[in-house]
Structure formats: C-alpha cells, structure tokens
Image: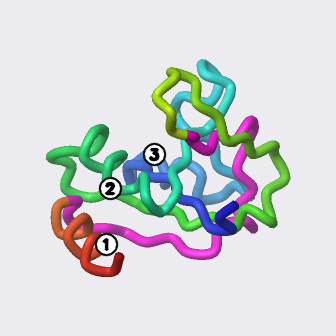
Amino acid sequence: METTIYHLVLPEWWETFADKDYYESETLHEEKFIHLSTTEQVNDTLRKYFKGVENVVLLHVDTQKLTSELVFEDLFSLGIQFPHLYGRLNKDAIILVETLPAASEWINKISNKQ
C-alpha cells in the first residue's frame, strides 16, 4: 500500500479550513467519505473533475498519520481500487500542500516524472 495518497481541492474550498486542524471535502457529509487518489490516479482525477480549472490545490497525505479510516474500494465494479477516507482529514497527516497554477501543465509535469 502506498504511504502517500493525494486529494485535489479548489483553493476557495481549501481556504475555508485555514484556521482548523482538519479538512472536510465538499461531499463528505453527503457521501460519508473523502475521495483520494493514488499516484497513478491523480492525472485521471484532474482530467475528469478539474478540466478547465485555473488553480487546484493538491494535498499530499501520509497514510500512516491518518486518524480516520482509510479504505481502498471499488464502488462501481471498475476493477480499480480507489482510496476513500471515512471521516475528516487531520491536517497533521498532510505532508505537502501544492498549488498547481494550471492542471494541464501539472499533468505533463507528473507524467514526465513517471
């Protein structure tokens, strides 16, 4: 299992948690979990949910520091296990907050790293 997973969030939403020691996604209360991505899933998440968005915040999360339950599951029978955090994301598990100026540039940068 990867020890670092990722969460993409719009800067405006991320800022609403600036003075808190935790983070909640916009869909946590509705879906009961926070969507996360493995290294291999970040680019697809960006393309699918953040296409055309000028700025995106990428949270690098240390799975060993999480206080809520992390579950890898395939909810739609796609044959792909997605990481879901069932509860708040404690900010002390976030090891890096990266602001991406343009999703397409970041996709190319990440693709070149792999």
- First in sequence: mark 2 vs mark 1: 2
Location of residue 48 with respect to 109 vertically, above or below: above
Question: Between 114 and 27, which is closer to the camera in this rendering?
Answer: 114
Q: Which residue is mark 1?
A: 110
Examine the structure image and report whether residue 12 is included in the region drawn in magenta.
no
Tell me the chief SS of the magenta region: strand
Q: Is residue 77 left or right of residue 31?
A: left
The quadrant in which the N terminus is found is bottom right
Q: Nearer the viewer, mark 2 or mark 3?
A: 2
Residue 95 percent across, percent down from the top left: 63, 74
- Dot label at residue 96: none
Circle 1 residues within 10 Å: few <14, some 14–19, many ≥20: some
Q: Residue furthest right?
A: 67
- First in sequence: mark 2 vs mark 3: 3
Q: Which residues are magenta?
A: 81-103
Q: CA distance from mark 2 to mark 3?
A: 20 Å
SS under mark 3: helix
Q: Which residue is mark 3?
A: 13
Circle 2 residues within 10 Å: few <14, some 14–19, many ≥20: some
Residue 35 percent across, percent down from the top left: 55, 40
